[in-house]
Image (cartoon, helix red, strand yellow):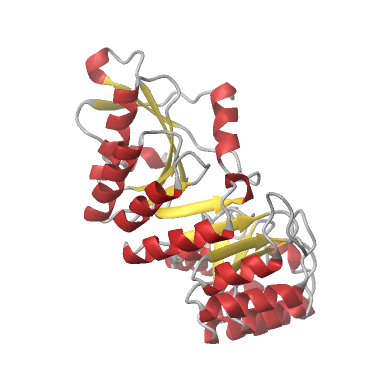
Amino acid sequence: MFCKRTEMSPQFRLSSRWPRNSAGSDRIAEALPAHSLPLTHCHFFDEKNGGRGTKWTFRFLDRALERAYIDFPEKTMETQDFALLDLAGKGSNIVLRDDQSEFAVILDSVKACRKNGGRLSLIVTGKFPVYELEWLGEAGADLYAAEESGASGRELALLTSACRRGGAVVAYHSRGILAPSQEPGLLTFSDLKELARSGIYIHLSNKDEKRDFSELAELAYQARKGGSWLVYYHHGALGVEVKDLARNGAWIHLSDASLSEAADLNLILDAAGLSARAGANLVVHVEKGLTLDWLEEISGSGAALLFKIVSDDNRRAMRALERKAKKHKLDFRSYYLYPNFML
């Protein structure tokens, strides 16, 4: 189990007990995007308290980066703060909701993370006013907002300036429609173009809403001009439009389920080359399994492979390809919170 390799303070011991689904798990699911996969659980107990009453739950979703999403289900505020600061002091990469601790503690945790080589990704829910989020951004917190946060385009632009001063980023995820005109709670396509020009990383998917590829290509172009990226998650059959998107500098995530014939493979190879020349890349999530020949061609094009399954092909070449893929570390700005998620 991955967590056994995680260093903890001497007063902690690891419990191998795996929890069942509970109300606490449901609460965590609400904090993450709707696409979230089942989470891995590891429990740490306070040895000084007899292993009872004070329980931390760490969910490690990004094994390569040891990025921890933290839940505080049964503790006092002091215990919560200690758990967060303890991780931050170790230079961990942490994903935290802004309503899970007080502002001063989160600010100290951000500074500790950056000082020790880690990053703190803060999910914006609307708890803090904009000026406090600016302080967190200047301290180095990466801010992740979605439609549910209620943040306006103007507020997000202010946060981008603050995060730039702190060497951090702002990412915005929209899973709904791109409103043609202003509607309550929705940013328009023009708003997203302004955000892209200001340097915000825009994350879109066609899982819930059909996307206009001409709009996506325009967003990718504006983001590239602003020094950021459009990160697009594609579901379903491929079309030649994906090449225009790649040419404009978008990061494109797709499942290997989208590749069903040789024409799809050729399209992916072309798109990978175009994306690389524009300073981005293409990421293929291996979920159903492809032949070794196809996987080698995709890898040879420069595209990234994310294996979500263990292949039945036990040939040495396949195992070597899997090891090579694991060594290919994605830029943290090229995905929304966790690389293995398909939004």
Q: Is residue 145 left or right of residue 78?
A: right
Q: Quadrant of residue 296?
A: bottom right
- What residue is shown at x 74% (from left), y 69% (from top)? 259
Residue closest to the eye, 220 or 273:
220
Residue closest to the eye, 104 or 291:
104
Marks counted in the figure total 0
Q: Quadrant of residue 85?
A: top left
Residue 184 in the image, given as x and y percentages of width and height: 71, 50
Q: Quadrant of residue 103?
A: top left
Does 101 sit above or below residue 175? above
Does 286 sit above or below residue 48? below
The N terminus - image quarter: top left
Does 325 sit above or below residue 185? below
Q: Decide if residue 315 is in sight here.
A: no
Residue 331 in the image, given as x and y percentages of width and height: 44, 66
- What residue is shown at x 72% (from left), y 74% (from top)? 215
Does 62 sit above or below residue 210? above
Q: Is residue 130 left or right of residue 39?
A: left
Q: Is residue 288 left or right of residue 28?
A: right
- What residue is shown at x 54% (from left), y 82% (from top)? 276
Residue closest to the eye, 110 or 291:
110
- What residue is shown at x 70% (from left), y 83% (from top)? 244
Q: Is residue 112 left or right of residue 208?
A: left
Residue closest to the eye, 260 or 56:
56
Residue 292 in the image, given as x and y percentages of width and height: 63, 70
The C terminus - image quarter: bottom right
Q: Decide if residue 212 is in sight here.
A: yes
